[in-house]
Image: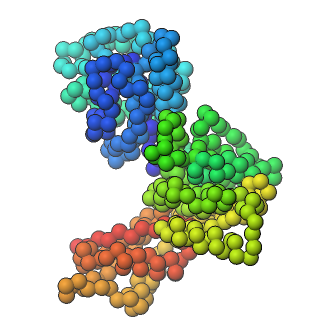
């Protein structure tokens, strides 16, 4: 399930950073009683009742002509464009100010769901003072106290109540969703344009901001696809520009929404350390993976070039030994016609379910080939193997003592499952549980 992005906006010194830190559970934002302390957007992840939240803290909004304040406003506007829901924070002690009214007008133009929160309602006598905030035209004001952590639960409940289910996350449809991720300038956008060529049936093309993700449905051989392009991800230590942080978050959300992630590598530059970091995001998210080597036409090749490059990839991406590799060129469209079928195959493997009886046949044969290990006279017994979920395929192994299940034997069982069933392109997970 994709996470929800919430932006907290408001004028200076209303307690945005305090509320942000309360939700996140850490002191990530600087909290001082001085306007203008938080200048850039600050990102963090949190969880509420099992739902993941991407939270964005912003600098205090003011509307004078100072360049400093215009930069803060620019950062806040990017955060609002990124958010699924916006929390406008006000302050009961100051009442409705002219700046509050200007912010409310700005929020009306976003067409985003907005929740109005009135901070610093620290005692019951102040609750009647929140009614003047109805004048902002943003619906019911919610009282809260950042200092005491009161009222946050009501606001977060309301956030999820007003958010409709994302139709793109409906597992019942037949659309295959895939994204392209990678460092900047590896050719992702060129690949998108090449895939969505004139010989494709493009249904629509909805774009966001310059560095936003681009969703474009298309159809090949009767199969519906949704392609999600993302801005390049740079090394965390080199994310100087705040819009790059925004790009990383968009890429992470694209992975969450996708059945398959295409990890794009630049053939001219070879494999970089950041390529491995980016691939790790998709692997950890449990997404199906295809490694796409772009700009293959630019290399001088002999009979061994492709094999040697593939060996380099396998050595660098050892955790992606299940991922197929394809060498393409967005410029010449070399092998691009093979991509849709490969994506379809990986998506099918990603959602594949295997009968328990077949799994346990594999388990019995595996234990004959390689008996379960012993530790200090105690022998591991694997009683039963069953699949509990898909996307990615996840299996539970019931054992006598899960402490005896070494990761190497868990990996052995995973490899035996792969040998018996086609799970090309998808990670598989094994969970060990003790039989009651």
* Vertical order, 116 against 182 (above or below): above
Who's the residue at 39% across and 45% down the image? 52
> Which of the two residues, 60 or 387, is positioned nearer the viewer here?
60
Q: State the image coordinates of residue 383 (x, y, percent, origin top left).
A: 32, 81
Q: Nearer the viewer, residue 191 or 383?
A: 191
Q: Is residue 168 left or right of residue 362?
A: right
| Residue at (72% x, 44% y) in the render | 203
Query: Please, which residue is most extreme toward the right here?
Result: 198
Query: In which quarter of the view is residue 334 placed?
Result: bottom right
Q: Quadrant of residue 204?
A: top right
Q: Is residue 357 above or below residue 320?
A: below
Colour treatment of the image: rainbow
Residue 373, given in percent of the width and then of the height, sits at 30, 85
Would residue 336 appear left or right of 260 to someone viewing this image?
Answer: right
Is residue 166 at least partly visible in the picture?
Answer: no
Outermost bottom residue? 368
- Going 67% across and 58% down the picture, which residue do you hit? 268
Q: Is residue 242 above or below residue 101?
A: below
Q: Answer with the quarter of the image where residue 370 lies.
A: bottom left
Residue 10 picture location, percent across and down:
40, 20
- Residue 54 in picture, x, y percent from top left: 41, 40
Number of marks? 0
Q: Which quarter of the rendered picture does the C terminus lie within?
A: bottom left
- The residue drawn where x is 53% and y is 71% is 315
Q: Is residue 98 visible?
A: yes
């Amino acid at each position: 399930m994709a996470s929800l992005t919430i932006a907290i906006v408001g004028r200076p010194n209303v307690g945005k950073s305090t509320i942000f830190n309360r939700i996140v559970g850490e002191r990530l934002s600087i909290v001082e009683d001085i306007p203008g302390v938080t200048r850039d957007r600050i990102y963090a992840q949190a969880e509420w009742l099992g739902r993941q939240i991407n939270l964005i803290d912003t600098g205090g909004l003011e509307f004078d002509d100072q360049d400093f304040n215009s930069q803060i406003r620019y950062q806040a506007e990017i955060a609002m464009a990124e958010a699924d829901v916006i929390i406008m924070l006000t302050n009961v002690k100051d009442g409705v100010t002219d700046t509050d009214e200007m912010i409310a007008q700005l929020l009306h133009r976003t067409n985003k769901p907005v929740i109005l929160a009135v901070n610093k309602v620290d005692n019951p006598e102040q609750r009647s003072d929140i009614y003047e905030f109805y004048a902002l035209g943003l619906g019911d004001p919610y009282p809260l106290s950042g200092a005491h952590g009161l009222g946050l639960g009501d606001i977060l409940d309301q956030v999820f109540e007003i958010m409709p289910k994302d139709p793109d996350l409906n597992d019942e449809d037949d659309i295959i969703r895939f994204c392209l991720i990678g460092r900047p300038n590896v050719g992702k956008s060129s690949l998108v344009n090449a895939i969505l060529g004139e010989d494709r049936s493009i249904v629509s093309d909805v774009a966001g901001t310059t560095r936003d993700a681009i969703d474009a449905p298309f159809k090949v051989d009767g199969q519906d696809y949704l392609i999600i392009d993302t801005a390049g991800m740079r090394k965390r230590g080199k994310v100087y520009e705040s819009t790059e942080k925004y790009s990383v978050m968009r890429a992470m959300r694209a992975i969450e929404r996708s059945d398959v992630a295409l990890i794009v590598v630049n053939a001219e530059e070879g494999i970089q350390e950041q390529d491995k970091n980016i691939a790790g995001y998709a692997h950890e998210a449990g997404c199906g993976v295809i490694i796409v080597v772009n700009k293959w036409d630019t290399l001088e090749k002999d009979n061994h070039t492709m094999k040697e490059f593939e060996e380099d990839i396998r050595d660098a991406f050892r955790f992606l030994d299940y991922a197929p590799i394809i060498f393409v060129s967005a410029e010449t469209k070399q092998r691009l016609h093979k991509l849709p079928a490969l994506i379809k195959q990986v998506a099918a493997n990603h959602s594949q379910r295997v009968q328990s009886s077949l799994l346990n046949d594999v388990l019995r044969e595996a234990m004959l080939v390689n008996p379960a290990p012993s530790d200090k006279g105690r022998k591991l017994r694997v009683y039963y193997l069953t699949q509990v979920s898909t996307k990615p395929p996840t299996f539970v192994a019931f054992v006598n003592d899960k402490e005896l299940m070494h990761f190497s034997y868990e990996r052995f069982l995973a490899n035996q499952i792969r040998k018996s069933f086609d799970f090309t392109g998808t990670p598989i997970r094994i969970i060990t549980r003790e039989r009651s």
